[in-house]
Amino acid sequence: MIDHIEIRTARLAESLIFYADALAPLGYRQKVDGPAKGFGNETALDLFLVEAEVPSDLHFAFTAPDRATVDRIYAAGRAAGHVLDRAPALASHIHPNYYAGYLRDPDGRLIEFVCHQPEPA
């Protein structure tokens, strides 16, 4: 199991804003302000940003608790002027309840927000 992820970014200031905006609906905030900038929620510290030269071919996904949260993250990204990739939608070719939306971070990486839960009745 993964304990934490370190993302190297050539645009640290912009990336701090992007991840703060995108992760706020998941209860995340910046908790560490050292050479590595750490993000987490009340029980975790699992995402770090470090300034460095970086390729932009990484794709990863954050789990959202429900589809409404995926929608809120995408809407918050749009409102904040972040680069949108794909609007939230059901991707039933992956599995029947795979609901995801996608943004691009300041380095161009594909950042996914996904819910695996069925739509509430």
Image (cartoon, grey):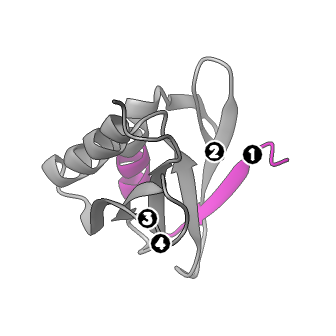
- Helix, strand, or loop for circle 2? strand
In the rendered structure, which amino acid carries the disc numbered 2? Leu
Q: Which mark is residue 4?
A: 1
In the rendered structure, which amino acid carries the disc numbered 3? Arg
Of mark 3 and mark 4, the one earlier in the sequence is 3
Distance of mark 2 from mark 1, alpha carbons?
A: 6 Å
Q: Residue 11 carries which label?
A: 3
In the rendered structure, which amino acid carries the disc numbered 4? Arg
**Mark 3 surroundings: few (<14), some (14-19) or many (≥20) residues within 10 A:** some
The reply to whether the C-beta atoms of the residues labelled 4 and 2 are less than 8 Å apart is no
Q: Name the residue under label 2.
A: 47
Percent position of residue 40, x then y: 59, 31
Q: In which quarter of the image is residue 7?
A: bottom right
The reply to whether the C-beta atoms of the residues labelled 3 and 2 are less than 8 Å apart is no
Query: Which span is picked out in magenta?
Result: 1-19
The reply to whether the C-beta atoms of the residues labelled 2 and 1 are less than 8 Å apart is yes
Q: Residue 109 carries which label?
A: 4
- Helix, strand, or loop for circle 1? loop
